[in-house]
Amino acid sequence: MSPTETASTAQPDIRAGRLDAAQYRSHFCDVHPPLTLAQARIEADRCYYCFDAPCQTACPTGIDIPSFIQRIADNNIRGSAHAILSANPLGGMCARVCPTEVLCEEACVRNTNEDKPVEIGQLQRHATDAYFDDPGAPLFTRAPSTGRTVAVVGAGPAGLACAHGLARLGHDVVVFDANAKPGGLNEYGLATYKTVDNFAQREVEWLLSIGGIDIRNKTALGRDVTLEQLTQDYDAVFLGLGLAGVNAIGIPEPDAVGVRNAVDFIAELRQAKDYAQVPVGRRVVVIGGGMTAVDAAVQSRKLGADEVTIVYRRGDDAMSASLHERDWARTNGVLVRHWAAPREILAREGHVTGVRFARTQQAGGKLVETGEHFTLPADMVLKAIGQSLVAQPLGAMVELQGGRIVTDAQGATSHPKVWAGGDCRVGGRDLTVEAVEHGKVAALAIHAALSA
Amino acid sequence: MADLSTEFLGIKSPNPFWLASAPPTDKEYNVVRAFEAGWGGVVWKTLGEDPHIVNVYGPRYGALLGNDRRVIGFNNIELISDRPLQTNLDEIGRVKRAWPDRAMVVSIMVPCEEASWRRILPMVEDTGCDGIELNFGCPHGMSERGMGSSVGQVPQYIEMVARWCKTYSKLPVIVKLTPNITDIRYPARAAKAGGADAVSLINTINSVMGVNLETMTMTPSVGKQGSHGGYCGTAVRPIALNMVAEIARDPQTAGLPISGIGGVHTWHDAAEFIALGAGTVQVCTAAMVYGFRIVQDMCDGLSNFMDQQGYTRVSQMVGKAVPSITGWSNLNMNHIEKAVINQDSCIQCGRCHVVCEDTSHQAISATRDGKRHFEIMEEECVGCNLCVSVCPVPETITMRTLAAGEIDKRSGKKVDGNYANWTTHPNNPMRVAA
């Protein structure tokens, strides 16, 4: 913004079609192009095949990483995919979205000498992509039917992993999901360039190909089905609800065009058939410090916004977006400002014009305002300060703590027929791969309970 | 700067790197390019009798590749020169006259009949070449016709043909040996007995490179069938080094000049052959993988090494490591080593632990105070060197020699500083009194 420009003089500017077709294509292509076969074979050779491999320990789903990499090296793609998908049925998406730099790749022993881990995420993508391109005979088959049916609520990573695990064990599964398409955050919540070519749906199709899983879309808990009814109609229930609520920013929000939830903006982009149809402000302010804030900010830039600023109320280290994500935002021309909390959303004639922020600081272990203020002009304001569990449909049937569902390590809730996993569960780290593990473990626990 | 020039059987060359008799030395064009690149000499691709042989016009070469496509091993089914004898002789003469400072040795393979050798030897000598090499080595194709390795596998034939060559030619005679035998000393002794001036080894090893599992056809194949070929390249070097050393330390052949061949890809490889008794080395695969300019890196490396070590001439290194090789029964049973892991450079891959645990002596622990930590347990370590061999970080696991008088924690006994070998060991039923 030019120094003389102020919120009161700026003309609101939100529109679609800021770029030409070639720009949209290049901005929204695969952010990390897949390895070629030659690159994958060479990279696979770098794996030391460690004893009790630290990378495997660091993987929330415990994928046998040395084995899947060895199998790439010795040209056994099917075996490699089996090693991955048997531990993580959503291993294809996790290969794309896992923060590997703080999981498997951080643990790689190659870091010690070279500061350059084996590219485990990219190798996992290579193996799963190659397998999905030519799957051949089913990798997994179902155990003989148990005659039991389990309800899974939520077709996101946790629910799908649980459904797949149960189907493998011979149970029938009915999955209820509020959205029009299955996939949860994989379908609606990720930046487009992280998962191109409709991969989320292709992965779901593969998951369902095992059989025995019936997905009912546009069926919301509390509206179309009740938890009480599910516990009566089914042998067990798994809740993979995710966090459907968006946290309020805690100040009055005028009813003005241009103020949006970042998750809605991200979902609209994911579902857009033509990115040129998605409107974006010329100046965008994103409030928040997590992955959602980064995904929204970077995609605003990629849609052609001139100025995009992430404003976070604490320092850089406290941001829940990983260092890799923060760097990615900066690489894409996003300005990240720290130590500022929103005080007022400014609007004129029904359109947002800016946000007034209070400067903050840490004092005596508390975040306090300094008394200074500044205003950022904006045509669009995206709120990304976190999501929350919509707990109302659960009633008093399961115990909650801090707004999330209390479970044991296997996902059992306070209700004997109900298990839960993923972001809706207490103690989660909001990671796709962790949601998958929750679903996988819960499937085994449900199986054990039904077999008892 | 070190002097790389060598004199082998009186044949001078500016460096010890000769191109072996093989596809790279097939004709004038190639050999001139090789000399321009700096090769010290060549052994011209093997000449035979007219009518010249013919080669297959399908795949002649196959490779054993790493995942990065680096050539580890190589094989071929190409036969000897498939051009008229006179064409080769004319070109050899021309090249030698144009490059008088380079070694020009001519490889020959004709039937095991005195008349054949008597006929070709003067023709070769007339080219002005420096020496001849008798190809008793090729294991493919020609061996089916009673030549190549089928001669090299019969010491009496080696001796007989070597004698004919010494009788009908004034040129130095090098006998090229096949490794496809059980004891390399016998053919070497036969060559010496026949009057040969030197041996060169190894020729290639019989091999099948692999099988195409889709078609269930060996590879490479000419249409639906292939044939075993001669194996060479980096992978064969340890076999070649042993055979060179066997000849160098055999009392009956010790001192017989050797031209070392087999997987020389770098100056370091060449220096190893020289240290085990080779006066020159011959190279083929490295040139076929990288082209001729690789010789410049070989010369540069050898020269720098010699400068660093204080050698001024290649001949000063010849055979220097031969005394370090002996029979197992001469090894010092009182010499005891233990592995040591440098914790500062250990990257904690744990491979040392798992291989010791699974396949060796359970002498490396995997945890300390509940944490990942790899350490040698000297009470179990037999000093086998497996952990050193598999550790991916250089100098991280090393072997420490126990000093005389130190307690060996495995046996609980003091290390005896005296030399004692198997021949006097109490467990040896055939022991001799110490």
Image: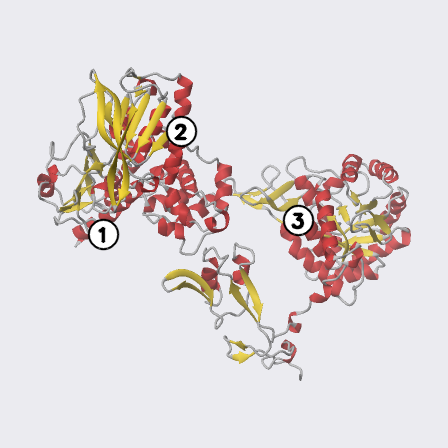
Circle number at residue B232: 3
Circle number at residue A409: 1
Q: Which residue is mark 2?
A: A332
**Residue A141 position within the rendered picture, expressed as x and y whole percent measured from the top left:** 29, 43
Circles 3 and 1 on the same subunit = no
- Kindly identify which chain the residue marked by label 2 belongs to: A
Q: Is residue A142 visible?
A: no
Position of residue A161 in the picture relative to residue B373 (left or right): left
Circles 2 and 1 on the same subunit = yes
- Image depth: mark 2 or mark 1 in front: 2
Label 2: how many Cα within 10 Å (few below 14, some 14–19, many 20+): some
Q: Amino acid at mark 3?
A: Cys
Q: Is residue A377 visible?
A: yes
Position of residue B139 in the picture relative to residue B104 (left or right): left
- Image depth: mark 2 or mark 3 in front: 2
Circle number at residue A299: none
- Kindly identify which chain the residue marked by label 3 belongs to: B
Quote the CA–CA distance across marks 2 and 1. Answer: 39 Å
- Image depth: mark 3 or mark 1 in front: 1
Q: Kindly indicate the quadrant of the structure image that contains residue A273.
A: top left
Quote the CA–CA distance across marks 3 and 1. Answer: 58 Å
In depth, the one of A420 and B406 nearer the eye is B406
**Residue occupying the point 35% across, 32% down:** A336
